[in-house]
Amino acid sequence: MWDVDGTGIRKIDDDNLARAFMAKVNDMNLETGRDALLLAAGFAALPCDLTGKLAGAAAVVGTLYFLQGKIPKED
């Protein structure tokens, strides 16, 4: 099932294409899980006083990144 053209979720007629999409999504999910696990393991290996500072800095940087272009400028 896939929402190819924005008209809603429907079955992909070509079985080979459907398998290719599924394989690509599964690969992406495995890569994302692996990356998250490595990041969490690296973060857990650091001392507590350092991780608190890193988490605070990451929260500030992440907030600024996601607010980028969303706050209107005064002319």
Image: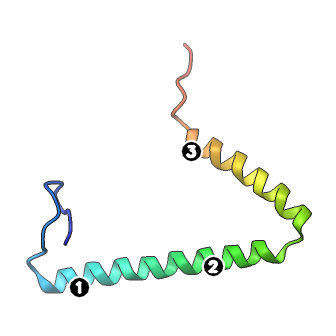
Specify whether 14 is left or right of 70. left
Q: Badge 2: few (under 14), some or many (20 or more) residues near its Cα, within 10 Å?
A: few
Mark 3 residue type: Phe
Q: Are marks 3 and 1 in contact (CB under 8 Å)?
A: no
Image location of residue 15, percent across then percent down: 13, 85
Q: Badge 1: few (under 14), some or many (20 or more) residues near its Cα, within 10 Å?
A: few
Image location of residue 14, percent across then percent down: 10, 81
Q: Which residue corresponds to mark 3?
A: 66
* Residue 44 to residue 64: above or below: below
Of 22 and 48, which appears nearest the observer?
48
Q: Which residue corresponds to mark 2?
A: 37
Q: Which residue corresponds to mark 1?
A: 19
Residue in the picture at 60% in, 74% down: 36
Residue 40: name its quadrant.
bottom right
Of 60 and 69, which appears nearest the observer?
60
Residue in the picture at 13% in, 74% down: 12
Q: Are marks 3 and 2 in contact (CB under 8 Å)?
A: no
Residue in the picture at 20% in, 80% down: 18
Foreground tag (2 vs 1): 2
* Residue 59 to residue 33: above or below: above
Q: Which secondary structure, mark 2?
A: helix
Specify whether 64 is left or right of 32. right
* Residue 70 to residue 58: above or below: above
Image location of residue 16, percent across then percent down: 17, 86
Query: N-terminal of the two: label 3 or label 1?
Result: 1
Residue 22: name its quadrant.
bottom left
